[in-house]
């Protein structure tokens, strides 16, 4: 956001994971980096936020009674008041209810997190999602809340293309560099629904799914890209949403949990979670780091999750080969190498009570006769780079993960 494009408006789609007695919205200046977390460099103002319940109505959000709030770089997570939703409307909400978050923010010289440095989750492919950067000196400023308190798709603001801004709201990772302010939707469940938090890398973020056709299945398009988005909406079965917040980021390292300030936001989000799915280690093994050291790095995150009262599912590290066509394991991913030793250590972590389940992803994406290479046809299971899950890996791992989540 610049002096000439200092205003952001956005509308994002979400599915509720269950029946709730209250809803509120959180906003944070913090975002993911490969070595943990960082914060934006300047304060920004959230001018207005509203919750749109599809086909029902739009309800304004307040922060300590005010429509606007200033978020400072030193903040961690700023929560709104409980949203004033009429009792009959709130009572009618439940699992799979379709809602939209509508928001407007203003800042100058603010670099919004790019390349999924923020928590991801909503689907860019859902019709009506959108985000626009534009100059504040436009007709929209005459009534700040007119656009935010409305229903339906946003009206494209006047002047939004003056700086060639890419106005595609992105989720997951791609070459697009659109803009969206991360907002967190918090609900108080009335039943026994679960909330899931994901810690991972580019495979968690959905890089490679889809890479080329076939694109998302129906629910993949609803939930967003990647195995966790597919799992959150019950993959290709009838949609049964589970609340999920995904902090996956390309090149992320398990060691990032212990860097200075590396877990401040995620520690707060753990407090709102029932299950943590941790899928790190792949990038740590791109160097010569010993297996025991990488497992120790992951263990620090498990300790934090357990301290927050969460159950923990840990993924094994998948194969990594030269490419999808040259199925030769690279570096530490060779048979008997550090990655194999790492994966072999994980069952003992269950026995020790540090984690609750291990999901062996290689059962679903690796050759049954050679767990160090990809399942055939490899071009369905791994991107051409030999590293990132393609659609078939995502679909099969997501189905197994959802079964495991439902069983905890």
Image: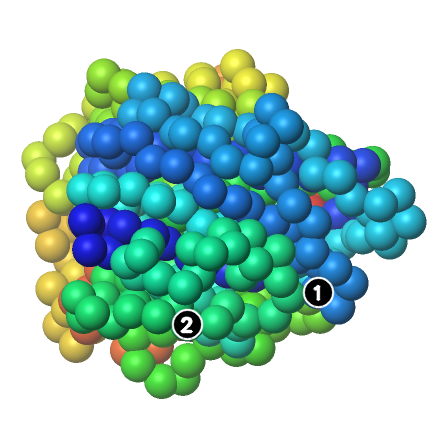
* Residue 68 versus residue 267 in the image, above or below: below
* Residue 394 versus residue 20 in the image, above or below: below
Q: Is residue 34 visible?
A: yes
Residue 261: image location, x then y, percent: 28, 19
Instruction: Please identify the quarter of the rendering in which residue 111 is found.
Output: top left
Instruction: Name the side, left or right, on which 82 lies relative to 86.
Output: left
**Which residue of the protein is positioned furthest toward the right in this rendering?**
88
Marks 1 and 2 close (CB-CB < 8 Å): no
Residue found 17% across the figure and 77% down from its top: 325
| Classed neighbour count for the residue bearing mark 2: other residues with Cα under 10 Å, few (<14), some (14–19), many (≥20) | some
The residue where tag 1 is placed is: 54
The residue where tag 2 is placed is: 156
- Local secondary structure at mark 1: loop
Residue 161: image location, x then y, percent: 25, 71
Residue 368: image location, x then y, percent: 39, 64
Residues 225 and 175: in front is: 175
Residues 202 and 361: in front is: 202
Instruction: Name the side, left or right, on which 294 lies relative to 25.
Output: left
Instruction: Name the side, left or right, on which 375 lies relative to 151.
Output: left
Residue found 9% across the figure and 38% down from its top: 287
What scheme was used to colour the molecule?
rainbow
Residue found 54% across the figure and 71% down from its top: 153
Instruction: Please identify the quarter of the rendering in which residue 344 is found.
Output: top left
Instruction: Name the side, left or right, on which 314 lies relative to 190.
Output: left
Residue found 39% across the figure and 37% down from its top: 45
Residues 45 and 200: in front is: 45
- Mark 1 or 2 closer to N-term? 1
Residue 27: image location, x then y, percent: 46, 36
User: Label 1 to label 2, Cα distance in Å?
Assistant: 20 Å
- Local secondary structure at mark 2: loop
């Amino acid at each position: 956001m610049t002096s000439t494009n200092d205003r952001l408006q956005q509308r994002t789609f979400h599915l509720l994971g269950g029946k709730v007695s209250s809803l509120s919205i959180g906003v944070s200046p913090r975002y993911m980096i490969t070595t943990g977390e960082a914060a934006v460099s300047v304060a920004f103002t959230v001018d207005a936020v509203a919750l749109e319940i599809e086909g029902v109505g739009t309800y304004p959000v307040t922060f300590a009674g005010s429509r606007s709030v200033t978020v400072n770089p030193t903040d961690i997570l700023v929560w709104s008041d409980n949203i004033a939703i009429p009792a009959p409307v709130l009572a009618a909400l439940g699992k799979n209810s379709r809602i939209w978050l509508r928001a407007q923010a203003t800042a100058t010289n603010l670099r919004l997190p790019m390349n999924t440095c923020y928590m991801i989750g909503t689907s860019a492919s859902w019709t009506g999602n959108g985000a626009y950067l534009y100059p504040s000196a436009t007709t929209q400023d005459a009534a700040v809340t007119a656009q935010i308190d409305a229903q339906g798709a946003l009206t494209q603001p006047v002047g939004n293309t003056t700086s060639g801004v890419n106005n595609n709201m992105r989720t997951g990772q791609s070459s697009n560099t659109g803009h969206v302010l991360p907002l967190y939707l918090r609900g108080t469940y009335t039943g026994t629904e679960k909330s899931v938090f994901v810690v991972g890398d580019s495979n968690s973020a959905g890089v490679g799914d889809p890479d080329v056709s076939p694109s998302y299945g129906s629910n993949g398009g609803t939930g967003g890209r990647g195995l966790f988005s597919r799992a959150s909406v019950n993959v290709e079965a009838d949609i049964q949403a589970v609340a999920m917040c995904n902090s996956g980021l390309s090149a992320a390292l398990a060691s990032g949990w212990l860097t200075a300030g590396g877990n401040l936001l995620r520690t707060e989000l753990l407090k709102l979670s029932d299950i943590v799915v941790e899928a790190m280690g792949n990038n740590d093994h791109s160097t010569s780091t010993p297996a025991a050291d990488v497992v120790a790095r992951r263990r620090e995150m498990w300790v934090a999750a357990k301290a927050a009262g969460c159950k923990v599912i840990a993924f094994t590290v998948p194969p990594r080969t030269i490419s999808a066509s040259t199925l030769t394991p690279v570096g530490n991913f060779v048979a008997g190498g550090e990655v194999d030793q790492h994966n072999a250590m994980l069952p003992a972590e269950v026995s020790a009570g540090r984690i609750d389940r291990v999901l062996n992803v290689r059962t679903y994406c690796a050759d049954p006769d050679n767990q160090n290479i990809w399942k055939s046809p490899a071009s369905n299971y791994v991107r051409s780079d030999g590293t990132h899950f393609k659609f078939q890996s995502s679909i099969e791992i997501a189905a197994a993960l959802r079964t495991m989540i439902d069983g905890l």
